Image: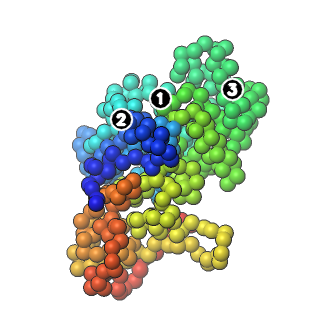
Amino acid sequence: MYSSVSQYQSIEMAPKSTETETETETETPVLDIQQLEISSVNRKGEKLEPIVHGISLSVKSGTMTGLVGESGSGKTLTTLAILGLLPSSLKVTGGTIKLNGEEISSMPERKLRALRGKKISYLFQNYQGSFSPFRSIGKQLVEALRFSLGIGPTEAKAVVFTWLERVRLPAERVFSSCCFQLSGGQLQRVALAAALMVKPSLIIADEPTTALDVLSGEQVLDLLSELQRETGCAVLFISHDLAHVLKRTDRVAVMYKGRIVEMGPTSALPSAAGHPYTQRLLQARPSLRGTIPERLSVLEADVRALPGGSLSLQNGCSFVPYCSCRTQHCEHTPELRNEGAHAVACHEWPVKEAKPNAERTAASAGEAAREVVYS
Ligand code: SF4
């Protein structure tokens, strides 16, 4: 039996034990986003066009949720909305964002500023811009800690040393270094220490390994997972890399063109992906096993033979041009529907018996545009 998106909003991560199940069901999520809409606005602040379309997502204490999708899918805009850092041309025009049960999307900037760096920590893509080159790392961390926790300089210095050691850095040397004296991997570890030392409820890690080499990136993410389990904070892990997300998260939400199209326990995704977009993402992962393909899976966009002639790129499901499963139903935007802990926004999910050929009228003639999903 399937239910609408509003019912889905109460779905939680598949528990690992009975004890966990009881705790998980009763616990208030650290982050609870409901029907969030972000739109572009004109100079008067009037709504022009929705960009993120009513997404719902929650992250509980001690868990890591992955938000995955290609560039431009709305992942980073969602995180900026959580932090209250949307540019002036964009605005939250619907829905709620709650942190530990408190609504923050309409909170005044002064109160939000107090939350950032105390209750919410942010790991940037561009971590190098997080530090001033004119002061030592140690002085900057001590100052940030004193501001966040209101503690004295001696205590703050001791906490900073502890955390530099916990992220496996030579604390003494790093404390007295400036940011340009450290490697990218070391600097991202410092950023991780800075994010965790204030004991936040929520860490938003937005593509934290983008600028690192593969090995340093893996080490930083392993460290993030380890310390997250240790401290019990909630992590929202934003990535375009499905492999990273599958390896480390408890739940995963897949975004496409401003909508969540699939969400559920990470362990179930590789074998039970329900949305054609998620399936294509999984197929596009490079593998070193078996026969190595000449090229990775690509999305073939076909805008010619849309079913019945009524479907267009402007209405209905936004995956229509790329979808080999599309039918006449796809002229209506699909809602996220759930089956147990798994939810998919697709009219053709779950797959029933094979449909007659007449109903699958997609893709029959003309030229095809080609877009590489992951290269
Ligand atoms: S709703 Fe239709 S077009 Fe969209 S993913 Fe499902 S089958 Fe494909």
Report the quarter where the C terminus lies. bottom right
Task: Find disc 1 in the rendering and name its residue.
Answer: 119
Q: Residue 308 versus residue 271: which sits nearer the camera?
A: 271
Q: CA separation, marks 1 and 3?
A: 20 Å
Mark nearer the N terminus (2 vs 1): 2
Task: Find disc 2 in the rendering and name its residue.
Answer: 98
The local secondary structure at tag 1 comes to loop
Residue at 44 percent across and 43 percent down: it is 21
Determine if residue 248 is in view: yes
Specify the amino acid type for callout 1. Answer: Lys
Residue 374, placed above or below residue 131: below
Specify the amino acid type for callout 3. Answer: Thr
Task: Find disc 3 in the rendering and name its residue.
Answer: 162
Q: Position of residue 159 (x, y in %)?
A: 65, 22
Q: Are marks 2 and 3 in contact (CB under 8 Å)?
A: no
The local secondary structure at tag 3 comes to helix
Q: Position of residue 307 (x, y in %)?
A: 27, 78
Q: CA separation, marks 2 and 3?
A: 31 Å
Residue at 40 percent across and 83 percent down: it is 367
Q: Is residue 219 left or right of residue 18?
A: right
- Packing grade of label 3 (10 A; few <14, some 14-19, many >=20) is some
What coloring was used for the rendering?
rainbow
